[in-house]
Image: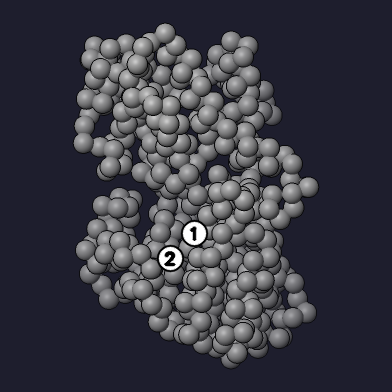
Amino acid sequence: MIETGLLNSQTATEKPDAETARRLEALALSYQRICVVGLGYVGLPTALLFAMNGYAVQGVDVSERVLDNIAQSRVGEVYPELGGWWAEVKDKASFSASRQAEPADVFLITVPTPVHTMEKTCDLSMVRTATESILPVIRKNNLVILESTVPPGTTRRLLKPLIEEHTGLKVGEDIFLCFSPERVLPGNTTHELIYNHRVIGGTTPAAAILGKALLGRVMKGDLFITDDVTAEFCKLAENTYRDVNIALANELSILADEYGVPMAEARELINMHPRVNLLKPGIGVGGHCIAVDPWFFVEASPINTRLIATSRKVNDRMPDYTVQKILRELKGIVKPRICLVGLSYKPDVGDTRESPAMRIVELLQEQGLDVVTYDPLLEEYQGQTLLDAADGADYLGILVNHTVVQQMLDSSRQEIENVMRTPMIRVF
C-alpha cells in the first residue's frame, strides 16, 4: 500500500526518495485494467495503444454510433490512421467497448470540452458526466487521469470533490488524481501519441509520479511532472500561442489586401529575417483545440486577456472576410454559381469541428447564392469528382487544399477550366 501522505512535504517536481519511487513504480506495474471514458479522436487511439501493450482495456462511450462502429469493426474506415492498430487489437480479448464503466485500475477521461457559442465559456458537462460514470466502480489505489482540455483548477475543483463526496475515498490518500493533456495532431495521431513529450500534473506529488510511471510504459516521449493546475495552464497556453500567431498572420493578410501586396511573396521575404517566422494566413481557425481553448483563459480573467480575446475575434472574423473577398471577385457576374472545395477544418483531415470552411458555405447560402460543395475526405460531400463539382461554376474556391485536391487540380486544371462557365480559380 502506498501511503501518499509520505510525499506531502514534497512538490510535484521534486525527485522522490528511492523507496517512494520504488513503491510507486511497483504500483504502476501492478495495474492491469484500463478504462478509457470517451472514444473519440484521442480516447480511441489511447485505448488501442494500451491494449496493444498488454493491458485489458475497456472503452466507454454514450454514443451508439461510436459503439456500433467498434462492434462492426469499422474503426479503420472512420479513422484510417488507426487501421493498423485496430487490426492488431480487434481479434484479441484485450479491448472491449460499452456504455457503462466497469472496475479498473486506471481511469482515463478523454471527453470533449466545447465552448458555449454565445457566452464563450467552457462546457464541462461531459467531463462531469464522465466522472460521475466511474464513481460507482472507483476503488482504493485507483489512478484517475483527466486528459480533456479544461480551465486551470478544474481537476481539483470539479473532479476531486465529486470523487470524495460520492465514494468516501480521499484524493491524496486513497485515490491518485492527475491531469495530463494530449498533444496529438489529427492525421498523425498514432505517431504523436507515442513520441510527443507530455506533461503529467498531479493533485499530489505521488499522483504525478505514478501517472508518469504508467504513461511511460506505453509512451516514448519525454514525460515531465508538475502539479495539476500548471499542467492545465500549459495546455491552454500552447494552443493560445498558436492562435495568437495565426491571428497576426491573418490580420497582416488583410492589410496586404488593402495595400495591394501579394501576401505569399511578402511572407517569404518577411521570413528571411533570422528571428521571424510568420505563419501562413488562412480562412480562419478550426478544430477542437485552437479555436476553442483560448476562450477558457478569457472566461477566467477577461481583464487580463485582451490580446487573447482580440486574437480569437480576428480569427473568428476570417470566414466573413473570406466571403466578402469572394463576392468582390464575383462582382459583375449575374447569378454566380460558386463551387467550394475542402470543408474540413484543415488539410488532409476529414474533421469538420469548428470548420471555418463550413461557416463560409453557410454565409454564402444565407445570401441566397448558388453554392456547390465538394470534399473527397468527407463522405457526405463526395459522390462526384472535382471536375463534376466545377461544371458550370463561375468560381472555384479551394478553401482547404487537401493533397488529393491539389493533385486533381494539377492534373486536370485545363479540363476544369473548360467546364466552368467563368474559369475563376482561387486556392486559399
Q: Is residue 406 left or right of residue 312?
A: left
Q: Is any part of residue 317 visible from this angle? A: yes
Q: Say the numbered circle drawn on residue 38.
A: 2
On the rendered image, what quadrant is the N terminus found in? bottom right
Where residue 164 sits in the image (x, y, percent)? 62, 84
- Contact between labelled residues 1 and 2, with CB atoms less than 8 Å apart: yes
User: What residue occupies the far top of the structure in this picture?
Assistant: 332
Q: Is any part of residue 222 visible from this angle? A: no
The residue lying toward the viewer, choosing from 94 and 378, is: 378
Mark 1: amino acid: Pro
Q: Say the numbered circle drawn on residue 112.
A: 1
Q: Residues within 10 Å of mark 2 (few under 14, many from 20)?
A: many
Tell me: residue 129, above or below residue 404: below
Mark 2: amino acid: Gly
The residue lying toward the viewer, choosing from 39 and 140, is: 39
Query: Earlier along the polypeptide chain: callout 2 or callout 1?
Result: 2
The residue lying toward the viewer, choosing from 156 and 278, is: 156
The structure residue drawn at horizontal position 57% and vertical position 85%, both measured from the top left corner, is 166
The number of callouts visible is: 2
Where residue 175 sits in the image (x, y, percent)? 59, 83
Tell me: residue 272, above or below residue 374: above
The structure residue drawn at horizontal position 74% and vertical position 52%, both measured from the top left corner, is 301
Visual colour scheme: one colour
Where residue 149 sits in the image (x, y, percent)? 57, 58
The structure residue drawn at horizontal position 63% and vertical position 71%, both measured from the top left corner, is 158
State the separation of the CA atoms marked 2 and 1.
8 Å
On the rendered image, what quadrant is the C terminus found in? top left
